[in-house]
Amino acid sequence: MTKFKGYRPESAPKAHLAGFFVLTLLISWGILLPEIFDLPLNVPTPLLIFVGFGPAIAALVLAAFEDGWQGITALLERLKIARISWVWYAIVLVGPFILFSSALALGAALGIEIDLSEPAILNTIAVENGNLFVLIFPAFLYLFVTLLGEEIGWRGYALPRMLTDQSELSASLLLGILWGLWHLPMALTPSLQAAISYLPKGWFLFDIIAMSILFTWIFVNTRGSLLIAVLLHASNNLAALFLPILPPAAADTKVFFIVIALKWLLALAILAANGTNGWGSFSGERQGQQS
């Protein structure tokens, strides 16, 4: 039975972590490979939803392997850690919109053409009366449900185990690289219409590593709340749907580069203030499963 101090297990076999990442790639990439290599295998469209749930499926399998049903329950109960300061809710729900809006304002000041009339959400859903606000809640709800498929794996299973013997910085960097690489086949799968298809792959990876640092900083300051991680991920993607940050909603990738710069400024500020370890006000010694 795995013993926890807060959100961190007392020990985490590296073979289990390696198994999680390998199984995640096998599930997600395995579904995409027939289309990427034009194989004579018709993958039903509904099955594509499991691409995004690869990390969650792998996490649940490993948690069950380690501790049976109790392992699955312990993992999912971190979605119930909701008694967090309102400040953190404000950061995760509004922060991405502030960051992206700041990037747009900087871009406009630098002479970059900004067109707010055709956000990415319109490529997915038509709005008859032009009122985009009616789409905010259903879009956020959709993103929350689908991004559970990622966060149960990345921040639910992998990050706490990586933090048992790594600093917050090293765990963030390694997880960011793996998180970014997991996305790469999506760029080669036209049916997904993923944003990464329109972006320079190296810069996308650079962006997601910065995101990983920001996610870890918030994670360790919110008692390892999986709920907060999912809300942050959903809010980030929602902002990208409603603001012209990424092509084709944006004319080019210039504003995206500004977003990357701002994220790295925030990441460097975290490092300057906290060093490479000990980022959280929550030490991990208290019971992180309470809600």
Image (spheres, grey):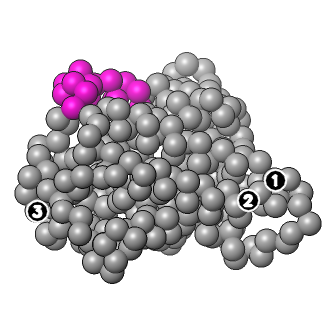
**In the rendered view of the protein, which quadrant contains the C terminus?**
bottom left
| Magenta region | 263-277
Q: Which residue is mark 1?
A: 36
- In percent of width and height, residue 176 lies at 46, 39
Instruction: Relative to 196, say whether 127 is above or below.
Output: below
> In the image, what residue type sits under mark 3?
Gln
Q: Which residue is mark 3?
A: 287
Measure the alpha-carbon separation of dots 1 and 3: 45 Å
Q: Residue at x 56, y 35 (%)?
A: 205
Determine contact: label 1, label 2, CB under 8 Å. Answer: yes
Circle count = 3
Q: Does residue 265 show up magenta in the picture?
A: yes
Determine contact: label 1, label 3, CB under 8 Å. Answer: no
- Going by the image, does 194 lie left or right of 219? right
**Are there few (<14), some (14-19), or many (20+) residues within 10 Å of tag 1?**
some
Residue 256 in view (yes/no): no
Q: Residue at x 26, y 71 (%)?
A: 74
Mark on residue 32? 2
Measure the alpha-carbon separation of dots 2 and 3: 39 Å
Secondary structure that dominates the magenta span: helix
**Are there few (<14), some (14-19), or many (20+) residues within 10 Å of tag 3?**
few
Element type at mark 1: helix
Q: Does residue 86 show up magenta in the picture?
A: no
